[in-house]
Image: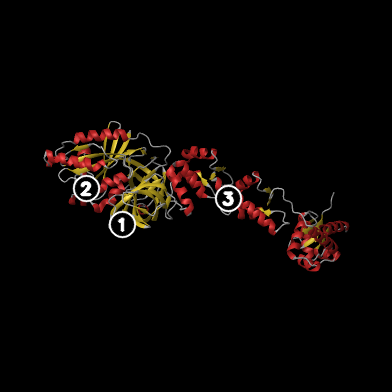
Amino acid sequence: MRRVVVGTAGHIDHGKTALIQALTGIDCDRWREEKERGITIDLGFAHLERGDLQVGFVDVPGHERFLHNALAGLGGIRIMLLVIAADEGVMPQTREHLAICSLLGIPAGIVALTKSDLVAPDLLELARLETEELIAATPFAGAPVVPVSARTGAGVPELEAALLDLAGRWATDAPDPDRPMRLPVDRAFHLKGLGVIVTGTLASGTVAPGDALEILPGAAGNRGRTARVRSVQVHGASRERAEAGERTSLQLTGVELSELERGTVLAEPGGYAATRRLAVRCTLLPEAPAPLTGWTAVRLHLFSARVLGELRPLGTKTIEPGETAEAELRLGAPVVAVRGDRFVLRRPSPQTTLGGGEILDPRWKRPRAAALPQALAALRAGRPEALALWAREAGEPGASDDDLARRLGRRPAAIAPDLTELAAAGRLLEAPAGHGHARRWIAPGVYRQVVERARRELTAYFERDRLAPGMPKAEAVRRILPRGAELAEVYLRWLAAQGVLTVTGDVINPPGREAKLSSTESTLARRLAERFTAAGLEAPSPAELAAELGAKREIVDGVVRWLLDRGRLIRLPGGLLISSAAVDTLATDLAATGWDRFTVPQFKDRFGLTRKWAIPLLEHLDSTGRTRRLGDQRQVVRAR
């Protein structure tokens, strides 16, 4: 079945609700107060089915005080049904509702001249001319204008025929498979015996009994908890599945009514994220009270959400009434948004519609001033350019397929061709999945910064410590990739392939580097080695040797490490240093004792050692397999 949703618009008491009842037989006024006062206060719903065409109606309040309720119901509308009473003509709310429908990008419209039975033919013709003049300057120019009377039924068949013709052109017969499910909630209530019920126009995807849905925004404004769908209804009839564009009612389990309200979004888990910062293309209405300059208090209406925030122009100092320009929104509470969503902006007090437009970036991060024009140009250009911008913005950690898809309101598979094309053109680098991270996309400019940082950090490190065997890998990652440690293996592999560095075990070096001693350091190394060898089993510390030889401590430390790396010295447990030749001699002498087992006191007495040296030496002999600890004794391990 093909589906389309029609939304009413128009001034209070121009007969919107009566007209819907005449078309569908359904009274959209649900509340007792609405019936007593004779005005629509909240959203009402009706439907009409003809053959394979299903037309859903959202009846919105006409009174200015209830415009926020009207705005909550206009998300997902494909056809505007503008209602103008022939006996009163165009009124303030007529103009405001029409402006709002234009700002929301509703693609089609039709006008009903109601109460046509109350005016003479010449006045009806004047009302038609006034209506055609009103819509001529809007996207609905040329829309059908149909005189009708809900009281007598005159014109109702003609209006229905025109509506069905328009609906047939704008109806969809299948949801877009590239878009995850999203249902902005416009009502949430509790029914005895059934539990929690929510309703809304399904913005994208499908939903069926048994589905798990994420409740957004969550408590922290980002990821939310989940609820399960117990049953699905469309226009009061049980269904196995509801599809995008349908008025949908869901019975939920696993959630409390207090967790749901108008503005909440039920979504496919992981498909969407909440946000407080947006970049938008904003059109200020010609009748807006003043230009927008600096931060201006606004109320954002996005689907069924209504949130206070601040707006300021981007790339220009002022947006004049009637102009369109980029702006950034900073919100006081999170909303669920994707690129391409339409919105309306109103002034909080006094309440006036200022304008509206389209979201360019739902998770806007303002770049530095010099980079702002390039960022705005990328957002204007289209999806591939936006993807490249967002990858560049992500920096060293890169952007995952899921992150990028969420900003677009698409499934990751849907944007894969764009990413592949950008990579083929050299505009993105693909970091394959691995080591607990998903595939990431990195901007070449970000990688070039990593290359420059790697060269700079390696140079600085070896200027400070020329004799180091290499920069420890952990330190290199910390210095070279302060934000990209999760992708360290990928970056190091790229840097090695490009000849920026080499990775050997747990150390990193520039290609071809070898720690070489100067002539002065070579002399110092020979003297240190001789001094350690002469000291035997109780060698002096590097500090003592530096004082003894009249050398700088940092130079002695570097030469000592050079001797350790080449096996000339050994660092015992606890940090004591000793000549490797002295340890080899000790092992030979120990084997010559004829002992099978011995105690620490025996070992100390035999070799004239203090406990300070005896215990570290025995631990070293244990670790190298020359002795084996057995309780309080050691066993000599002899070669077979």
Q: Is residue 26 left or right of residue 376?
A: left
Q: Secondary structure at mark 2?
A: loop
User: What's the residue type where badge 3 is placed?
Assistant: Gln
Choose top left, top right, bottom left or bottom right for residue 604.
bottom right
Q: Nearer the viewer, residue 594 or 397?
A: 397
**Which mark is first along the chain, 2 or 3?**
2
- Measure the C-alpha gap from mark 3 to mark 2: 59 Å
Q: Secondary structure at mark 1?
A: loop
Left or right of residue 582, residue 193 in this image: left
Q: Which residue is mark 2?
A: 11
Q: How many other residues sit within 10 Å of disc 2, few (<14), some (14-19) or many (≥20)?
A: many
Mark 1 / mark 2, whichever is N-terminal: 2
Q: Amino acid at mark 2?
A: His
* Location of residue 364 in the rendering, given as x and y in whole percent from the top left corner: 44, 51
The answer to which image quadrant residue 178 occupies is: top left
Question: Which residue was labeled with disc 3?
Answer: 449
Is residue 21 depicted above or below 564 in this figure?
above
Give residue 315's position: percent from left, percent from top.
42, 51
Q: Nearer the viewer, residue 587 or 280?
A: 280
- Asked if 553 appears above or below 381 in the picture, the reply is below
User: Mark 3 and 1 residues: CB-CB less than 8 Å, in contact?
Assistant: no
Of callouts 3 and 1, the N-terminal one = 1
Q: Amino acid at mark 1?
A: Pro
- Residue at the disc numbered 1: 348
